[in-house]
Image (tube, helix red, strand yellow):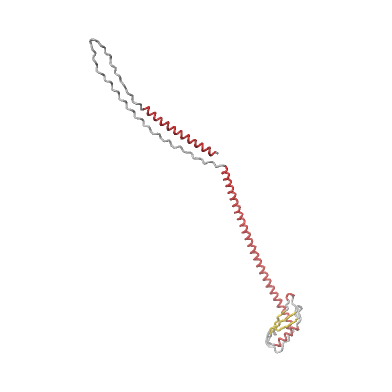
Amino acid sequence: MRPQRADSGRSAGKWIAAILAIAVNLGFVLFLIFHVSWRNPLPETVAVEVYAPPVEKTESVKAQPQPPVEPPKPAPPPEPPEPPKVEPPKPEPPKPVPKAEPPAKPDIALKEKQAQAERERKEREKQEAQKRETERKQQEKRLADARERQALEAAALKAQAEREQRAQQQIALNAARAKADADYIRRVQAKIRGNVVLPPDMAGNPEAVFDVVQLPTGEIIDVQLGKSSGVRAYDEAVQRAILKSSPLPRPDTPEMFRRNLTLKFRPLD
């Protein structure tokens, strides 16, 4: 794979650089050694040989022996020159080691990462869509609740208005019925009162109450004294007048007919 080839290339490069550095340093050391040896040669020993001149033998003159010649002293060896000061080689600054590049991820990992990012994006979009849908439903529910409350309030107001209207109508109807009933009772009482013969020496204005049972045609079928006036002659006179007034006047509408009537009479009315 490509990452292994890159590692092998870098390892080989490192080994070559190390070998070259060792070779350069070794050559520099050898150069210093040879240079110092060449500048400091070993002193040479000088040997001097002395030869005596040949002596001619004559008969008359004997050669005088000459004193021995001392051999010349050898010259002192020259002082060895001071070795040049060799400055130690400055260490080369370390070469910056190139940062190892991270190995390239395989295509499978990249595809998996892209797939994971795509899944996360779809999940976010799904959550956002659900959130929007929830908010929309909540808004619709709030609107529906508001409309329902308005409808209920309107219905309640309408029902209340209808109840008030019916109550007013009922009050008016009851008033009309009460008035019509009072008129009907007055007509019945007027007819009966016209047939009452008051007893002589009638004092005061006592009240007598009678319960009358009639048919729809107005015919009287029963008369009962509900409350006496205290004057028997007046009570009997009113009872006879009721029976004599049969049939009684009929109401204006059949709905106003009442089978049982309660009639009150006073002599001075």
The image quarter containing residue 260 is bottom right
- 209 versus 173 height, above or below: below
- 84 versus 193 height, above or below: above
* Residue closest to the eye, 143 or 183: 143
How many labels were placed on the picture? Answer: 0
Q: Does residue 51 appear to the left or right of 228 in the view shown?
A: left
Judged from this view, the residue extending furthest toward the top is 59
* Residue closest to the eye, 195 or 221: 221
Q: Does residue 180 appear to the left or right of 108 in the view shown?
A: right
Location of residue 72 in the rendering, given as x and y in whole percent from the top left corner: 28, 21
* Residue closest to the eye, 124 or 212: 124
* Residue closest to the eye, 81 or 12: 12
Q: Does residue 254 appear to the left or right of 133 in the view shown?
A: right
- 247 versus 79 height, above or below: below
Location of residue 179 in the rendering, given as x and y in whole percent from the top left corner: 70, 76
Location of residue 64 in the rendering, given as x and y in whole percent from the top left corner: 23, 14
Quadrant of the image containing the N terminus:
top right
Location of residue 80 in the rendering, given as x and y in whole percent from the top left corner: 33, 28
Quadrant of the image containing the C terminus:
bottom right
The image quarter containing residue 198 is bottom right
Q: Does residue 63 appear to the left or right of 85 in the view shown?
A: left
